[in-house]
Image (cartoon, rainbow, N blue to C red):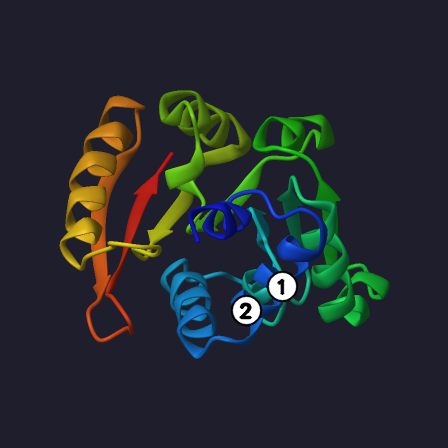
């Protein structure tokens, strides 16, 4: 079971494909992604970045809010890239969505500065959170908004894990130079509540 849970951090092969299908089908995942995007208050002309787009739920929700801007997604899984492309093919064809395979660091190669950025259930897999936040700060325009969402998952996960995550990442965001850090909670999400940390670059 632990080996399968690892697929949610870096999906590969058939187990990764199956993990992506599970992520895309669960109502809680759909709601968590939609909630995160709604919290960002995306405007029609915004440039929006998602890191770890998985099967493409978050970018799909973001594209619906961007009519004259652009949504860009990076994910290090080829399996997820394929699922997200199929889910969002029309938006890609219309030029509203750009999906790339690669880590957060690769986003700098586009030479874009973003109005909004987000990730859902990705931050817990980063080996160096401080470096990741520095990358986000460099990618966001001054005053750009970042959302980091986490819902405890896996064997032994508890609701209190969300609060511990929020407390830790509140400190990391402050230390990384982000301002106006706030924590939102989706208390009735099943099977465990989610937290979203919002901050400005």
Residue at 39%, 73% (x, y): give it.
28
- Up the image or down, 112 lies above or below 34; here it is above
Residue 61 visible in this rendered orientation of the protein: no
Residue at 55% of width from left, 49% of height from top? 7
Location of the C terminus (image quadrant): top left
The span from disc 1 to disc 2 (Cα, nearest Å) is 6 Å
User: Residue 170 or 113: which is nearer the viewer?
Assistant: 170
Q: Quadrant of residue 190?
A: bottom left
Q: What residue is shown with label 2?
A: 22
**Residue 131, picture quadrant:** top left
Q: Which residue is mark 1?
A: 18
Q: Residue 56 at what x, y percent from top left?
A: 63, 62
Whether residue 47 is visible: yes
Left or right: where 148 falls relative to 62: left
- Badge 2 local density, few (<14 within 10 Å), some, or many (20+)? some
Residue 116 to residue 111: above or below: below
Residue 60 in the image, given as x and y percentages of width and height:
62, 67
């Amino acid at each position: 079971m632990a080996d399968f849970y690892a697929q949610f951090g870096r999906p590969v092969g058939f187990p990764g494909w199956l993990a992506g299908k599970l992520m895309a089908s669960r109502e809680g995942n759909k709601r968590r992604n939609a909630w995160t995007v709604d919290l960002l208050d995306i405007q029609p002309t915004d440039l929006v970045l998602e890191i770890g787009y998985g099967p493409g739920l978050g970018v799909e929700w973001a594209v619906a809010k961007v009519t004259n801007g652009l949504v860009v997604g990076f994910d290090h899984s080829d399996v997820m890239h394929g699922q997200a492309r199929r889910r969002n093919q029309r938006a890609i064809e219309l030029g509203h969505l750009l999906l790339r395979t690669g880590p957060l660091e690769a986003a700098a190669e586009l030479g874009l500065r973003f109005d909004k950025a987000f990730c859902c259930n990705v931050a817990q897999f980063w080996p160096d959170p401080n470096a990741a936040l520095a990358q986000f700060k460099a990618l966001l325009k001054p005053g750009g908004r970042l959302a980091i969402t986490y819902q405890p998952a896996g064997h032994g996960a508890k609701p209190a894990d969300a609060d511990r995550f929020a407390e830790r990442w509140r400190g990391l965001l402050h230390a990384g130079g982000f301002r106006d850090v706030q924590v939102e909670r989706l208390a009735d999400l099943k099977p465990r509540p989610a937290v979203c940390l919002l901050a400005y670059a």
